[in-house]
Image: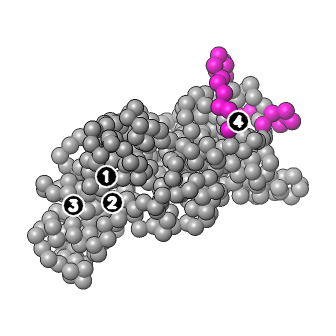
Amino acid sequence: MNGPFPASALPSSDFHAGLPRSHPHPAGFDYLVVGAGFAGAVMAERLASQRNRKVLVVDKRATLGGNAHDRHDDAGVLVHPYGPHIFHTNSADVFAYLSQFTAWRPYEHRVRASVDGQLLPMPINLDTVNRLYGLQLSSQELPAFFERHAEPCSPVRTSEDAVISQIGRDLYNKFFRGYTRKQWGLDPSELDASVTARVPTRTTRDDRYFTDTFQAMPLHGYTRMFERMLAHPNIKVMLNTDYREIQHLVPWRHMVYTGPIDDFFDHRHGRLPYRSLRFEHVTLPKQQHQDVGTINYPNEHAYTRVTEFKHLTGQEHRQTSLVYEYPQAEGEPYYPIPRPDNAALYRRYRDDAEQLAHVTFVGRLASYQYYNMDQVVAQALKTFRQLVAREDDAESGCATASEGSSARPADKVAQA
């Protein structure tokens, strides 16, 4: 890979985010990409390999891959420092794109929830209900069981509504309410219905956490995949550097920004709320600790879940490493909090972003959306195509005012 190289002793600039400075200079870079996670890496790779553009990727962390970064811990176990990242997608295009940079290890994730002294399948399925209540229902009988216990409400507005209207209050209290309160610091009745809608309920014995067509882990880890994505000779990487330190010192023509959109604008309208996480990593002198990759703890502990990495990676090792996840209000931004007032605040920043002709916003933080990894890749591939089309139009003199600027953040993810 070209780089990374240090930027120590570079002065901070008095950058005003609403007035970005571009430098169309032949000796500089065509693109300054802020962030070396999925969104930034995909954009950089496409611009370099498909458009022969010179790209500088800058990240404030000392590592590649954003939150998907993985590394070997002191015991030699491959772990995810920022929590488990399990790849799954229904997009053949996204999977084919990433397959250029990694081989895969097939992996279907399974989760158990610690409820009433048992470890029960999650999402809730036939076995969950039968074991919890001592029943012997069939798949054909389970829908009627849910219907008897459901409390219909219309319209469904909150996360509480979404669950109770489908499976009833007892299952909601045992599996969802406590977990959601810990995760978000709010009662489910205060959160958008989309929060719990992410976890389906099944009438079969299928205990896979995901049912996507493609479920696999990068064979040699995420970091190796990112290294290969950014290995193009047109790409330079600068880590351990805030982009504001170098944006006035390095010539560039167009910025691709993947960080928090409110931070870009110096929080001029106020801070967008996020939930964060604290990770406690533990190594045990045994080959296996859990029967499945992740165990959820919706009720009895301060942490929400515990993941054992060797299930995910398939690594053989005499020891095993786990991560305990503790949700918290402060820290790195992980989860946008889905409430109407937060969405309205984001739209104010999106409107500001649309006024910037030399900045493109892409990724979950720039879009204030909780996207899965494959959704970020799909969004970045779509954004690349849109950026190329505008670039071609501008070069041919065909651009029109109605096409707008290149800065609009994507609100919805389109499959690549």
Mark 3 residue type:
Leu
Where's the N terminus, which quadrant? top right
Relative height, residue 195 to residue 70 (above, below): below
Give the alpha-carbon distance from disc 1 to disc 4, as whole Å: 37 Å
Left or right, 387 with respect to 372, comes to right
Q: Quadrant of residue 284?
A: top left
Q: Residue 294, labelled with which disc?
A: 1
Mark 1 residue type:
Thr
Q: Quadrant of residue 123?
A: bottom left
Number of residues whose C-alpha sits closer than 10 Å to that of mark 2, classed few (under 14), some (14–19) or many (20 or more): many
Helix, strand or loop for disc 2 = loop
User: Which of the marked residues, 1 or 4, is nearer the chain's N terminus?
Assistant: 4
What x and y, as percent, mark residue 120?
21, 61
Mark 2 residue type:
Arg
Helix, strand or loop for disc 4 = loop
Q: Main secondary structure of the magenta part?
A: loop
User: Which of the marked residues, 3 or 4, is nearer the chain's N terminus?
Assistant: 4
User: Which of the marked residues, 4 or 2, is nearer the chain's N terminus?
Assistant: 4
Q: Quadrant of residue 172?
A: bottom left
Q: Residue at x 36, y 52 (%)?
A: 311
Q: Residue 110, labelled with which disc?
A: 2
The residue under label 3 is 120
- Which residues fall within the magenta stretch? 1-29
Number of residues whose C-alpha sits closer than 10 Å to that of mark 3, classed few (under 14), some (14–19) or many (20 or more): many
Give the alpha-carbon distance from disc 4 to disc 2, as whole Å: 38 Å
Query: Was residue 9 drawn as part of the magenta stretch in this picture?
Result: yes
Mark 4 residue type:
Asn
